[in-house]
Image (tube, rainbow, N blue to C red):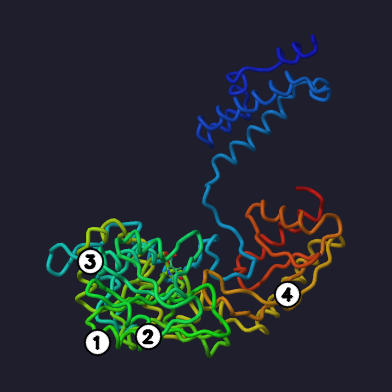
Amino acid sequence: MANKKELLRQLPSVDEVLKTPEVKNLCEIYPRILVVEAIRQELDDIRTAFSSGSETSLKTSFDLPVLISKVKRDVEEASAPSLKRVINATGVVVHTNLGRSILSKKAIDAIVVIASGYSNLEFDVKSGERGSRHVHVSSLLCKLTGAEAAMAVNNNASAVLLALSTLAAGRGAIVSRGQLVEIGGSFRIPDVMRQSGAILKEVGTTNKTYISDFRDAITENTALLMRVHPSNFRVVGFSKEVSLEELVSLGREFNLPVLDDLGSGVLVDLSPYSLPEEPTAQSSIKAGADVVTFSGDKLLGGPQAGLILGKKKYVSLMEKHPLARAIRVDKFTLAALEATLSLYLEEEKALQEIPTLHMLTMSQSELKKTADRLAREIRTAVGQRMIIDSETDVSKAGGGSLPLAELPTAVVSIKPLHMTVNELEQRLRSGKPPILARIKEDKLLLDVRTIQESEDEAIIASLKQLSSGKS
Ligand SMILES: *Cc1c(COP(=O)(O)O)cnc(C)c1O
């Protein structure tokens, strides 16, 4: 008991710790409030350990240098940004949890320019009058897709919400049962429809819907016919979907607009690159859809945004809807979006410079070369404690896009000999920077498709450190 009291008496006050030269130094670099908080926390922890009186804690006497090094570590951790860069070695290109698309250099440069100064966001410099933020992307979108009018909002979920609120609130919107999808993060089409005030009318069955199902469901209260692209799944086997063309011709007959939610929305036909066919925004416009919505950061490879294309009369109604203000897109997004879209004016350029498209269309032989090289470099760095190889495997497009696509890829495989593969995965994931990989049997796979060139060094350094036994 005396021992415990003696130990507690040895503990310095927060002020005393603050006066040590190392901690004074720390206060020069980091906010003092974080340093004080860390000291208080560490002293509390020691007090708790002493009072709980476990045999081991009673034996150790108070050690100031240890306390200071813990405080230093805590302060570094507390002042590190919460949102940080990670290395995506999962091979999932449009990885929603990892920020979906990474931007082209052109888009990044555009953000920096617009973020660093004032801009003509809503100002027409020619007339000197107030302008619209939509003009910065609408003409490009129209040029690329053949649409009459276009606008951008915060994301595709809000684009669908705005379209339904504007065109179908209080009235009926007809959609096939087979397309009442959940996208992920519990975004469900039926919930969004309800939220918009539209009255959802489901027709057909899970696997089969005919145009006659739509026709039979139309009443005077019907406002809209809707198609939703089943982004993240496919119905195989005995199935029937209504084509957009059929829906458009029914819509014309009854004077009802057709809304097409494309989800991923590509602007380039990806089928020549051995990817499954994905409907392009151009094809929806060509088929006559009145309003088309899709994401800016899925297969398009731009910033988070919801893109709306369509007939002028509908798009101008949407621009004026009060909800449009609540879900408006910000200037950084517009800058990145304009830059991304401008790359699509030359398909070659889009495929080369937009990282999402580039990663999706890389050939396996190209990837194998990269995996061979990276495997060699890692092998040299880690020595005998891990078995390093390069292998072929398959990666996924992700982001609820191209669900059936199996992209032939190449990976660096790592079989650790001094820890389990799960432990290796966890250690890499909690490293600086975090490295996210996938496990296959007793090996960890680093898929080179999604690893950026500049990230090789950090991967090698992390593995080197883990193989040396230090953490
Ligand atoms: C992804 C997706 C959405 C939601 O788009 P966000 O940009 O994530 O808001 C809506 N509809 C479909 C069909 C989708 O695939």
Q: What separation in Å lies between label 3 and label 1 (alpha carbons)? A: 27 Å
Q: Earlier in the sequence, mark 3 or mark 1?
A: 1
First in sequence: mark 4 or mark 3? 3
Residue 432 located left or right of residue 344: right
Front tag of 3 and 2 = 2
Q: Position of residue 217 (x, y in %)?
A: 32, 77
Which residue lies under the disc numbered 3? 319
Given residues 135 and 238, the one toward you in this image is 238
Amino acid at the residue labelled 2 = Ile
Beta carbon of the mark 3 residue lies under 8 A of ligand 1: no
Amino acid on which the number 4 mark rests in the picture? Arg
Question: Under tag 2, what secondary structure?
Answer: helix
Label 2 environment density (alpha carbons within 10 Å; few <14, some 14–19, many ≥20): some
Q: Amino acid at mark 3?
A: Glu
Q: Earlier in the sequence, mark 1 or mark 2?
A: 2
Q: Is label 1 or label 4 in front?
A: 1
Which structural element holds mark 1? helix
- Image coordinates for residue 464, horizontal then vertical, percent: 76, 58
- The image quadrant that residue 449 belongs to is bottom right
Q: Position of residue 312 (x, y in %)?
A: 21, 77
Assess mark 4: CB under 8 A from ligand 1? no
Identified at 84% across, 62% down, the residue is: 383
